[in-house]
Every structure is written in structure tokens, then in C-alpha cells.
Image (cartoon, rainbow, N blue to C red):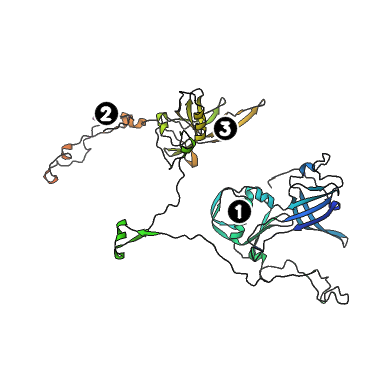
Amino acid sequence: TFDLIEMSPRLVVDISDKVIDYRVTKMLSDLGNSSIPVGQLLASTGQMTMFDDDQAFNDNNTNSIVSNYLRKNIKFNFYEKIINVDGFDYFIPIKTLYSDGFPQADVTGATVSLGLRDFYFFLESMPAPRLLMTETSLSMAVSTLLDYIGFSNYTFRRVTGESDPVIPFFFVAPDQSVAEVLNQLAIATQTAMFFDEYNNFIVMSKDYLLPESGNRSTDFILSGSNNQTDNGVIKNSTSGNLPNIISISSQDKKIYNDGKITYTTRYIQRTFGVRKQADKLESEQTWIYLPSLLWEVAGTEETRSRNNAAQQASAYALGAIPINSSLTSSVPSVSNGAVINNIMDLGEGIFYLPRYQGYFYSNGEIIKFDAVQFNITGTGNVWISSNQEYQRYFASLPFNGKIYPTGLVRIYSLPYYETVDGNTRMKSGAVYQHGRGQFGTPVVEHTAGINEYWTNNDYVRGCDMQTQYLFTTVLDEDINPPSTTVAAAGQNNTLARQTTRNGIIKNLT
């Protein structure tokens, strides 16, 4: 069995007869920045000039079937054709490149020039996922990135017995492309990464790219002759193979292992154990580690600021709020074209709500909310999700008007939608996502006020106590308590049930 990823038509044309000139530059590494061709991921480029006598590659030619696709990375496969070898023609792949930008047309000469790049353009156009993985192998990291963007033509090449590099902490920061992350992996692991002639992404270790004589078999052997120019000699002296080395040039780098490591200095500061020791002799001073701020939560956005300058608080705030009405364990759903079970009633406690979007925690459940309801004079009840929205409504408030929270908070939900008779509406039933039971917590019922368990007389217990032995001015050694007995210590449930219990909190002064 197999999973079909894509099936679509392709227009394939042999344009060899139209090609005037082409150049292909395969990039494995920039030796100007390194001494060995590893640790980089670079784009291979090319240039092609064609005889465009029928203006097929002119984007203004409406009769051309390819003019509408010139800006969409046309794929070009380059082959070296060896004709009539024992009756067969062999096509040796050179490189797979894609058009880059608009063709440069010369109407007078009926030619068109195309800039070309390999599939690197796809990697640099795709955003990388935000990841944090520990003890991750290089192959796992590369596979995760490429599988995320739907690219599966990749191979890993290492010599036999070579271990896969392990990355202790593989972190992908936001706003990075896949190409940037792969280049960082190539630098960190000294790995060569490139696209081969078949457009496969190759991840090759340094030992595989630059092997010792016994690490792996030789890829190919180049033949040469020292006397091929003497007396018309065209063969090697020891074999019948024609020489295929035209010329050899080399550059000697005497210093190939010199380098400079730049890093940020990190150390643990020390200070006096007690400030008053600063004025004492060294024999009286003790040293401890100096606490340093490594990270802190960003300041909380003010919920009801009157101008932009005051919309950001200087500190992060947490709030504890009692609910005004009980919240059932029913999750949000759609009924009669509206979302139900997605409202929390905080009553007057809404005044202490520190933000418009966030999370509530109660009874072991985490609930995500995304808006707070406000009543606005002349507008009515509206849901506000940010300080910017609050300022927008506040700016349009009529003279002598009011804007205040109603006490209702909206639980996050994302319903399904359907189109009926050309009208798009919410689909009845369960929603696609909701804010109940976040992070794997159970969805439970939340009771407003005191739980019935605490007010029910069936669960009340009481006992009589002889407090004269507890609250007295007599010394303990002068008190003669009565003898102890094995029984309930003055149990008196009848007296206990005469009491009343409620959820009212009073501030006694």
C-alpha cells in the first residue's frame, strides 16, 4: 500500500533545439569561508538562453500555452546526451533547475534569457515549525523539518559504522525558514547538504564526502596521460582508455586549521552574604552567589486604558475571581445557528479580570477564554478581545455615555461551517475546537458560591468541648483535667445542625 500525496497533469516539452547556451553552477560550499566543503547549504544557479522565434516565452503572448506559467518556477531538466554507444543513446543527468524571476526577452534577436535556481528556493520560502526537541539525532531533525513541508525526496549518506550526530537541544526559533534551520544544522554537525542531479536532497557526512581510502568504495576514477601530446599518442601507456582529464589546477592553503572562536562570556557572580560584611575584614566576609534575573513574564496588557501610552502594565498580574453563576460540564456546541455553553458569568468579580484573553483554572480544569462582554451606550453589548478594541469603542463613546463590563466572559470556540443554498452558516452539533479542558485537564462542573455539601445538615457533625481547660489563666501544672474515657468526645450533632452556613465573606474589623 502507499499514500497518494498528489496527482496532477504536467506539460513536458523537449526544447533542446531552442537552447542557444546554458551554464550550470553547482554549489556545495563556499571555500572562501571554509577550508572543506561542509557546513553550508547554498543554492545552485544557472543561466539559459533560448531562441524564441515563436514568442512562446513572452508573457504578453496570449496564444502561448506557457506564458501564464513563466513566473511560477518552470522546471528544467538538463542532460548530457551520449549518442550511439553500441546502438544506444545515454542521457546523463546534469542538474534540475527552476526559473527564477521573469524571462529577459530580446525581441530584436528573438531570444530569451532565464535565470535558474535549484529547489533551494522552496526551502527558503517555507516557514519552519516552532520546535524544541531534546537528544535529537541529525536525521530526525532533518526529517521532521522536511516532512513538515511535504518534501520526501531526501537521503542520508554516512560511511558504514558512523554514528548519527545527536543534538542535545534542537530549538527552532520563530520567523525562520526551513533553509535557515537546515543551514544551522549543517554548520553545527559539519554536514554537507545539497540537491543532486535528480533533485534529491542529500545529507552527507564529512567522513562520507571526504573519506579515507578504506572507508568506502571509490565513486569514479579519472584517467590521464603524460604523453598524449607526443607523436600523436592518444591512449594511456597502461590501458586502452582515453584520457578524460583536460587540466588540473590547485591552490595550496598552508594554514587550513587556523580559526577563531567567538563566544559570549558567561559566569556566576558572587557577592557578600550580608551587606554589613562589606565594611568588615576579609576574614569576616562570606561569599554567596549573586541572584540574577534570567527571565520574567512580560507585562500584562491593561484591560481598560484610556490612551495608548498606558495600555501596557509594568508587571504580570494574576487574578482570583469567584463566579456568579454555576458552569456546567457541557462543552460548547452549536444549536439553532448559535454557539451555546460558551459563557461564564463572573458578575461584579469581572472588575478583577486582568486580561481579555487567557486561561482560568478551577477544580483541576483549565478553561481558555477569548473575549469579555461590555455594554456601550448607543451600541449595546459587544465582545472585546483586546485593549485596542476597547480604545476604539471608548473613542466613539457619546457624550455622557457609559462603557462597562457586564460580567460575562466568552469561552473560546471554533465551530464548523457549512454552505446551504449559497449561505454560509455554523453547522449544528459539536464544534471543531473549544476552550474547555485545555492541556488534557478534565471537564468538570463549577459551582457558584458554597457547595451544597457544606450547607446540607446531613453532613454536619459537632461535639461538646470543655473549654474551661483551654481558655484559662491557670498554669498547666495546676490544672487537674478529668479522667479520659474511650468514646466519642462529646459528640453532639443535634446542636451542630442548628447552625447555618453560607458563602458570604465578611470583612470583620
Q: Amino acid at mark 3?
A: Pro
Helix, strand, or loop for circle 1? helix
Q: Earlier in the sequence, mark 1 or mark 3?
A: 1
Classify the position of the C terminus by image quarter: top left
Q: Is residue 101 visible?
A: yes
**Closer to the camera in the image, 162 or 199:** 199
Residue at the extreme left? 478
Q: Which residue is mark 3?
A: 415
Identity, as a three-letter code, of the amino acid under mark 1: Val
Tell which of 497 and 30 is nearer to you.
Answer: 30
Cα separation between marks 1 and 3: 35 Å
Residue 493's image quarter?
top left
The magenta segment: 480-509
How many C-alpha atoms fall within 10 Å of the one at disc 2: few (<14), some, or many (≥20)?
Answer: few
Instruction: Note whether 250 is above or below 24 in the view shown.
Output: below
Magenta: predominant secondary structure element? Answer: loop
Q: Position of 218 compared to 401: left or right?
A: right
Residue 144 is inside the magenta segment: no
- Of pointers 2 and 1, the one earlier in the residue sequence: 1
According to the picture, the residue beneath numbered tag 2 turns out to be 499
Position of residue 329 measured from the top left corner of the image (x, y, whole percent): 46, 32
Tell me where residue 60 appears, x and y as whole percent: 80, 41
* 217 vs 454: above or below: below
Q: Nearer the viewer, residue 487 or 220?
A: 220
Q: Are marks 3 and 2 in contact (CB under 8 Å)?
A: no
Residue 181 tag number: 1
Residue 491 among those drawn in magenta: yes
- In this rendering, which labeled residue sits more in front, label 2 or label 1? 1
Q: Nearer the viewer, mark 1 or mark 3?
A: 1
